[in-house]
Image (spheres, rainbow, N blue to C red):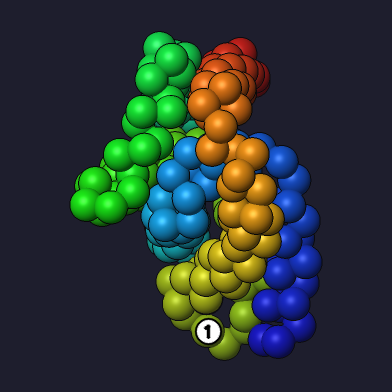
Amino acid sequence: MVQDLIGFAVVAGLLTMIPGIDTAQVLRAAALGGPARAYATLLGIMAGVLVWGAAAALGISALLVASRTAYDVLRLIGAVYLVALGARMLRDARHAPAAAATVTGQGRSRHLVPAFWRALLVTLTNPKNGLFYVAMLPQFLPTGVPAFAGGVALAGVHALECLAWFSIIIWSTHRARALLQRPRMQTWTERVSGLTLIGFGLRVAVER
């Protein structure tokens, strides 16, 4: 069992450290909203990882492999959501400094729940997460452990790796907060994040 967990941890760890949608989300949240907002985003990502792991263990996400239609539908939903989210960031970029200021004090808590749900939806609408677990779970499920429990355990390992890796990113970004809190930098952070998500969305839409 330990060897299975270690083997999966290596593969999932490498996947976690590759820059992608998750990295873009966490960096944006850390730059504009500070550690609290970034960790709310990270919790959304981790929750999505656990859902995908449980779904794969139950065989639900295997539909993404067996049914091309199911895969395409989820892929297009994810693409539309990413493009819409990126377009909204570009639209709101000119208001980024004012929006970031409201995160402090009494206005901070109301930004955390939307950050969580946004990250959760992005994670759940990315079909590559489902394909990853469908491909990996059969190889690393611990012997003698029920499939659902094993799937959740492996997803838990992945979630903990996300917590460790993105904590490094969050606190590294926090140390540069003096630079990142400048109005011009906040505006460009929002623009770059928006363009990044639009780019990912378009890539997801056209990939086969």
The kind of secondary structure element at disc 1 is loop
- Whether residue 37 sits left or right of residue 194 in the image: it is left
> Residue at 76% across / 83% down in the picture?
3
Q: Name which residue lies at 43% across and 28% down.
A: 97
Please identify the quadrant where the N terminus is shown: bottom right
User: At which x and y percent is residue 16?
Assistant: 68, 53
For image coordinates 68% across by 77% down, the residue present is 5
> Would residue 157 be seen by someone viewing this image from the given angle?
yes
At a point 59% along the width and 53% down the height, the residue shown is 174
Percent x, y for residue 19? Answer: 71, 41
Q: Which of 111 and 61 is in front in this view?
A: 111
**Residue 144 vertical position relative to residue 25 in the rendered view, above or below:** below
Q: Residues within 10 Å of mark 1 (few under 14, many from 20)?
A: few
Position above or below: 93 against 33: above
Looking at the image, which is closer to me, 133 or 181?
181
**Residue sitting nearer the eye, 79 or 105:** 105
Is residue 126 left or right of 1 when viewed as pictured? left
Residue 154, by quadrant, is bottom right
State the residue position of label 1. Answer: 145
Residue 44 appears in the rendering: no
Q: Where is residue 52 in the image (x, y as percent from the top left)?
A: 46, 54
Is 193 placed above or below 171 here? above
Assign the C terminus to one quadrant of the image: top right
Callout 1, which amino acid? Answer: Val
Q: Where is residue 121 drawn, in percent x and y?
A: 37, 40
Residue 15 or residue 57, whichever sits in front: 15
